[in-house]
Image (cartoon, helix red, strand yellow):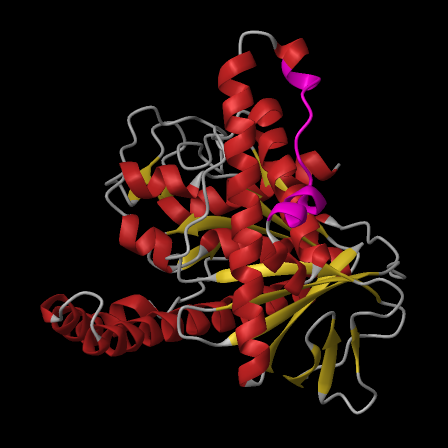
């Protein structure tokens, strides 16, 4: 299995300059190769056999034309080529959108380098990390990488607020035994825009709605930003203030989701959720701000890998399963149920259901059936 560890780093001014150069060179290689492929695609899109036989220039061939590409890490340029190849694979195989050009105005920039015989390593005292071309960078090692984890690659990124981080990807062999979940150790979760989730026992996450709490300050700072001359020094300073507020909200959200997912992963042997399309829900149900604020997609990702680390299971049921309309007592489907009906009565058995709790019970029952 693979696992990444993200740490804050504090590069010197010289190292920051080289990092920014690498960002630009990686972006240049990616865009040049994409432009070349785009020309060939437009030329041979009706003849796929001929399109597959086309040859494209490599980063090494670009170096012969642009000497300044030799200043940065060559593996970073090779990874740009791999990323473009993967983007086209997703386009042709999975039908995902055609690859787009990278912009230098994007607030978050990053590049990836590989570990070759210890070129990426952490010092014994835990104060520095060695990266090709950059040598030793000061690092805040808030937790140790466990023994037995082999470093495969490292991704250096710069956030919109100017903070630098390194994400170290490791490979390891899990030693935990898979757990066979018993029905009484299975938790069912129904998505809730207001509180993140409702479980089959009637408990909710009580998500604090960090974006709503920050709205007043964001409104004030964004109004000031709109009055600044775009590109000016005061505009840059105000833009940084707004970015810091958004970063604080993102950090609060991530911290809450990490703690909540860890608590559930420690308490249950299996968790059942619905495989929902959160982006579509935010666009169709007038719940865009609430849906995007609670970070349900991130929460599901955290649940998946935390459960996997413990030998446990995350079960996803089909999004078309009628969890809300199905009576958990007699299994009768209420075809007249609308989104505004938060409490409803079953016409057959006269059971009174809270919409979300009833859905969570049905989700758990379906998950237990799939596990069996």
Residue 72 in view here: no
Residue 152 in view here: yes
Q: Is residue 62 magenta?
A: yes
Q: Is residue 344 left or right of residue 118?
A: left
Q: Residue at left 32%, top 37%?
A: 345
Q: Position of residue 158 (x, y in %)?
A: 50, 69
Q: Is residue 128 left or right of residue 340?
A: right
- The residue furthest top is 47
- The residue furthest bottom is 125
Rendered image quadrant of residue 310: bottom right
Q: Is residue 248 magenta?
A: no
Q: Residue at left 66%, top 30%?
A: 56
Between 90 and 192, the residue placed more toward the observer is 90
Q: Is residue 256 left or right of residue 148?
A: left
- Above or below residue 161? Residue 270 is above
Q: Which region shows up in magenta?
A: 51-65
Main secondary structure found in the magenta portion: helix
Q: Residue at left 43%, top 74%?
A: 252
Q: Residue at left 62%, top 24%?
A: 93
Q: Tell me the quarter of the image containing the C terminus.
A: top right
Q: Position of residue 344 (x, y in %)?
A: 30, 39
Q: Position of residue 332 (x, y in %)?
A: 44, 26
Total count of labels? 0
Between 225 and 216, the residue placed more toward the observer is 225
Q: Position of residue 210 (x, y in %)?
A: 33, 70
Q: Tell me the quarter of the image containing the N terminus.
A: bottom right
């Amino acid at each position: 299995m693979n696992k990444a560890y993200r740490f804050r780093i504090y590069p010197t001014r010289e190292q920051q300059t080289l990092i920014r150069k690498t960002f630009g060179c990686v972006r240049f290689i990616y865009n040049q190769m994409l432009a070349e492929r785009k020309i060939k695609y437009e030329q041979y899109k009706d003849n796929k056999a001929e399109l597959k036989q086309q040859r494209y220039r490599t980063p090494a061939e670009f170096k012969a034309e642009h000497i300044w590409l030799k200043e940065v890490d060559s593996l970073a340029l090779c990874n740009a080529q791999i990323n473009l190849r993967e983007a086209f694979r997703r386009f042709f195989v999975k039908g995902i959108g055609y690859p787009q050009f990278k912009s230098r105005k994007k607030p978050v920039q990053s590049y990836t380098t590989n570990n070759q015989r210890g070129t990426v390593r952490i010092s014994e005292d835990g104060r520095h990390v060695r990266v090709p071309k950059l040598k030793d960078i000061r690092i805040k090692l808030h937790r140790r990488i466990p023994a037995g984890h082999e470093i495969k690659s490292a991704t250096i990124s710069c956030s919109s607020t100017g903070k630098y981080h390194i994400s170290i990807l490791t490979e390891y062999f899990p030693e935990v035994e898979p757990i066979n979940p018993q029905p009484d150790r299975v938790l069912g979760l129904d998505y809730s825009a207001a509180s993140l989730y409702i479980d089959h026992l009637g408990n909710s996450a009580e998500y604090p709605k960090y974006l709503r709490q920050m709205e007043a300050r964001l409104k004030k700072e964004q109004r000031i930003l709109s009055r600044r001359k775009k590109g000016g020094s005061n505009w840059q300073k105000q833009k940084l203030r707004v970015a810091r507020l958004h970063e604080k909200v993102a950090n609060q959200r991530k911290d809450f989701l990490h703690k909540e997912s860890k608590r559930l992963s420690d308490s249950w042997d299996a968790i059942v959720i619905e495989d929902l399309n959160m982006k579509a829900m935010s666009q169709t149900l007038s719940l865009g701000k609430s849906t995007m604020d609670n970070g349900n997609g991130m929460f599901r990702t955290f649940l998946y890998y935390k459960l996997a680390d413990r030998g446990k299971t995350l079960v996803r049921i089909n999004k078309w399963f009628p969890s809300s309309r199905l009576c958990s007592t007699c299994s009768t489907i209420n075809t007249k149920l609308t989104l505004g009906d938060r409490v409803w009565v079953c016409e057959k058995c006269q059971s009174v259901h809270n919409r979300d709790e009833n859905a969570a019970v049905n989700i758990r029952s379906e998950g237990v059936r799939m596990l069996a």
